[in-house]
Image: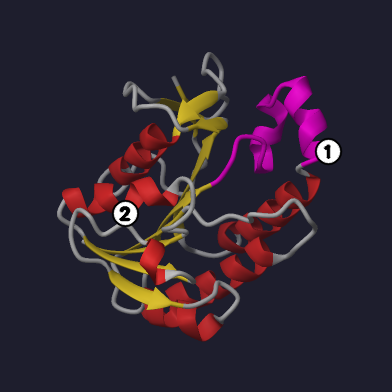
């Protein structure tokens, strides 16, 4: 498969690219800092650019089979980066005829807010308020389109080793609200062949 990755140099994306290469996929990565893309498992086609630039996103998406994104804001300040990125991405996917999107979301986004615990709801309403507002606006761009998306919604992300046995559900009942980034990207890669979560947003955990 030809797969373009957005957010390839981020805290979670840096684990995704090597996993895709190991699985034999042809990987393209959009990055503001190309030297930070991990190519230890093979050769990555790198496009230098910014998520706010529609022309750059269109260039990255053209000719791809699947779009995968772990792109997220690195600031707690109010911003519209997710909304702009997703708007540009939807347009690029439509123009290129690419239908499949596997996107790293977060527990508490969209209709998963109801299943977040009380403590995390306070954090979402205060410290992370701007991030979640922007994330929700971005995802709405995709939901309102005909894109075959899967929003993967983990809880707190850790840098620990992969444990495997990742479980997924729409209500999150019985799932631990923390998970290794390595297990998150493994679940995302599984969605390349698994169609059970298309146009759905599974909560994942152990």
Q: 107 above or below 83?
A: above
Q: Is residue 140 left or right of residue 157?
A: right
User: Main structural element of the magenta stretch: helix, strand or loop?
Assistant: helix
On residue 17, the disc is 2
The answer to whether residue 116 is magenta is yes
Residue at 19% across, 53% down: 41
Asked which secondary structure carries label 2, the reply is helix
Q: Is residue 134 left or right of residue 186?
A: right
The answer to whether residue 43 is magenta is no
Q: Position of residue 113 (x, y in %)?
A: 70, 34
Residue 28 location, quadrant: bottom left
Of the residues tagged 1 and 2, which is closer to the observer?
2
The residue closer to the viewer here, 115 or 59, is 59
Count of marks overlaid on the render: 2
Q: Position of residue 146 (x, y in %)?
A: 49, 64
| Pointer 1 or 2: first along the chain | 2
Q: Residue furthest left?
A: 24
Q: Is residue 57 left or right of residue 164?
A: right
Q: Position of residue 71 (x, y in %)?
A: 52, 57
Q: 17 above or below 128?
A: below
Q: 35 above or below 148?
A: below
Residue 98 location, quadrant: bottom left
On residue 125, the disc is 1
Q: Looking at the rendering, in which quadrant would you find the N terminus?
A: bottom left
Residue at 50% across, 86% down: 55
Residue numbers of the magenta segment: 105-127
């Amino acid at each position: 498969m030809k797969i373009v990755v957005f957010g390839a140099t981020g805290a979670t994306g840096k684990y995704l690219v090597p996993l895709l290469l190991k699985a034999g996929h042809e990987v393209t990565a959009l990055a503001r800092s190309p030297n930070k893309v991990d190519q230890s498992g093979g050769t990555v086609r790198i496009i230098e650019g910014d998520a706010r630039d529609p022309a750059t996103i269109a260039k990255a998406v053209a000719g791809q089979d699947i779009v995968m994104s772990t792109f997220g804001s690195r600031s707690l300040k109010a911003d519209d980066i997710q909304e702009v990125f997703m708007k540009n991405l939807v347009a690029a996917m439509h123009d290129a005829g690419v239908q499949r999107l596997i996107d790293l979301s977060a527990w508490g986004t969209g209709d998963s807010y109801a299943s977040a615990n009380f403590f995390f709801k306070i954090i979402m309403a205060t410290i992370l308020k701007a991030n979640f507002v922007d994330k929700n606006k971005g995802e709405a761009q995709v939901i309102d389109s005909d894109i075959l998306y899967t929003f993967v919604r983990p809880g707190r992300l850790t840098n620990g080793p992969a444990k495997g046995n990742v479980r997924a559900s729409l209500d999150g009942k019985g799932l631990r609200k923390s998970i290794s980034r390595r297990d998150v990207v493994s679940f995302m890669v599984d969605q390349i062949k698994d169609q059970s979560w298309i146009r759905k947003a599974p909560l994942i955990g152990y």
